Amino acid sequence: MLSRRAFLKTAAATAALSAIAHPKPGLAATAKPTRLQPGAVVGLISPASATFVREDVEIVMDAVRGLGLVPRLAPHLFDRYGYLAGQDQDRAEDVNQFFADPEVAMLLPIRGGWGSGRMLPYLNYDLIRQNPKILVGFSDITALILGVSAQSGLVTFHGPNGLSGWRTAQTDFFRRVLFNAERVTFENLVDGDDGDRLMQTRYRLQTITPGQAQGKLIGGNLSVISGIVGSPYMPDLEGAILFLEDIGENIYRIDRMITHLKLAGVFDRLSGLIFGQCTNCTPDESYGSLTLEEVIWGHIQPLGIPAWYGATIGHLETILTLPIGLEVAIDADRGTIEMLEAAVV
């Protein structure tokens, strides 16, 4: 039997661990990271799928240098555990270490894939809260940027991974938001192939419910969001603007995941909703199918909140840099997202 002193010591240690592994939900995003300056250090991490091809990392390092920044490799960057980039605790420790390092200004994942959600219980959210830095990524990294925003109050960014395209348009948005601290208004990009047409054929805006709304911007990959709904790593959605995107899912699976959000009460609390691109989301050959538009309209239109379909948010050549947890204003008739304040200081 434990003595009282030993019991209290054990209880204190357990409580300290629980503060990291099971943080309290419901923090509002209030902390902003410092804007990027030329020569700032960028910590390269692999929170999800394995990164074991050195050439991929060299490509990302070249992109970082092209931004005028200095890349630094995480200690476990080249680890591999099956399809994961190492053990969950080790991947989380890389994140914790970079947040603790005063020289590191931004954390940039090499790629998405799968695995970010597995390491959320091992992040030190008190440490992250006390050392606000830029954390950016998309696809599976949705779990990381939403989890950190929910549990630390840090404004994070749905934006490029390291192996994204980094062409002119993407780099321009990245610089305006994270270097220049601009209040950017986002709207649908025009595809290059439509430049000399009489009409637009790609990335057309389709208003589901007209109107304007204001709220904090939350969102990312639908599959990932569906997987963390109900956990302490999903930000508070009261009055929020939610955006969703996905890739390579059958239409019935999109229907199932949106139904999950609906049954979980996610849509009941929103001020507005944006559905982006669903790349290669096709019917299942084994079933008759609704169209993707029928699924989206069927779930979203009855909500009666400003909403539109077809935003240029998703697995595209140009990845917009969107602030998570920041107040924005949207116009569903024009398809615009207006930042109401700078996302960095």
Image: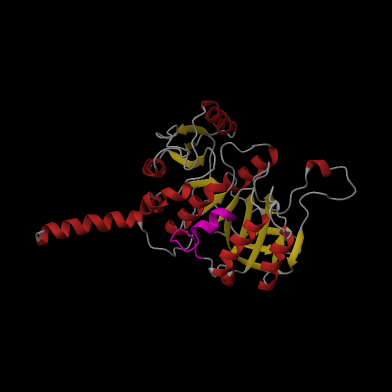
Q: Is residue 229 magenta?
A: yes
Q: Looking at the image, which residue sits at the far front?
A: 286
Tell me the residue at 53%/46% (across/down): 136
Q: Quadrant of the N terminus?
A: bottom left
Q: Position of residue 278 (x, y in %)?
A: 68, 52
Q: Position of residue 343 (x, y in %)?
A: 56, 53
Q: Position of residue 14 (x, y in %)?
A: 25, 56
Tell me the residue at 79%/49% (across/down): 202
- Relative to 125, say whether 36 is above or below: above
Q: Position of residue 101 (x, y in %)?
A: 39, 40
Tell me the residue at 69%/47% (across/down): 280
- Residue nearest the observer in this picture, 250 or 170: 250
- Relative to 295, say whether 277 is above or below: above
Residue 103: image quadrant is: top left
Question: Colour scheme in the image?
Answer: secondary structure
- Relative to 158, say whether 297 is above or below: below
For residue 342, say whether it is visible. Answer: no
Total number of numbered discs in the rendering: 0
- Residue nearest the observer in this picture, 237 or 280: 280
Q: Would residue 132 be found to the left or right of residue 220 on screen?
A: left
For residue 190, say whether it is visible. Answer: yes
Report the magenta residues as a range: 222-236
Tell me the residue at 45%/58% (across/down): 233
Q: Is residue 324 magenta?
A: no
Q: Would residue 67 be found to the left or right of residue 335 on screen?
A: left
